[in-house]
Image (spheres, helix red, strand yellow):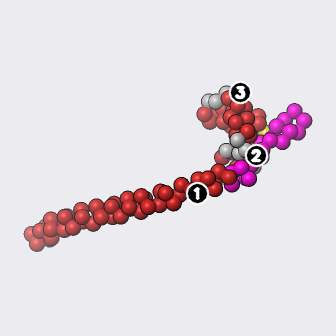
Amino acid sequence: MELLGEGERPAGAVADIIGAAFGISQPAVSQHLKVLREAGLVTVRAEGTRRFYGADLDGLAVVRAWLERFADGFAGPLDALETELARGKRERRLADRPARERRRGAA
């Protein structure tokens, strides 16, 4: 998907890049492209015997809308986690303060 987000590419080029980077065979890449096409996430355009794949922005918009339903569900717990982390830092800083003050007084 990352490659196709940069623009339309021939299936062979996608297979070459993915194969070199991850050791995935050309038939496996073709199967992945087929699944992505059937899921509506990529488009395919035939030009002679070559197939050019690109990201399907409409399909990705559907995925984005679906994912946004979960974003609010994570916001509260993440805010609470941030608060707890800040509280922990503050408590460590306060606990460490007397030791620092003792060292200053001894100097």
Q: Which mark is residue 54?
A: 2
Query: How many other residues sit within 10 Å of disc 2, few (<14), some (14-19) or many (≥20)?
Result: many
State the CA–CA distance, disc 1 to disc 2: 23 Å
Q: Which mark is residue 68?
A: 1
Secondary structure state at the residue bearing disc 3? helix
On the rendered structure, is 31 left or right of 84? right
Point out the tag, 1 or 3, that comes first from the N-terminus.
3
* Residue bounds of the magenta highlight: 43-61
The residue lying at 43 percent from left, 59 percent from top is 78
Is 43 rendered above or below residue 64? above
State the CA–CA distance, disc 3 to disc 2: 18 Å
Outermost residue toward the left in this view = 106
Quadrant of the snapshot with the C terminus: bottom left
Amino acid carrying label 3: it is Pro
Query: How many other residues sit within 10 Å of disc 1, few (<14), some (14-19) or many (≥20)?
Result: few
Amino acid carrying label 2: it is Gly
Work out whether residue 5 can be spotted: yes
Q: Which residue is mark 3?
A: 27
Does the stretch in magenta take in 53?
yes
| Residue 55 percent across, percent down from the top left | 73, 48
Amino acid carrying label 1: it is Glu
Secondary structure state at the residue bearing disc 1? helix
State the CA–CA distance, disc 1 to disc 3: 34 Å
The residue lying at 33 percent from left, 61 percent from top is 84
| Residue 31 percent across, percent down from the top left | 70, 31
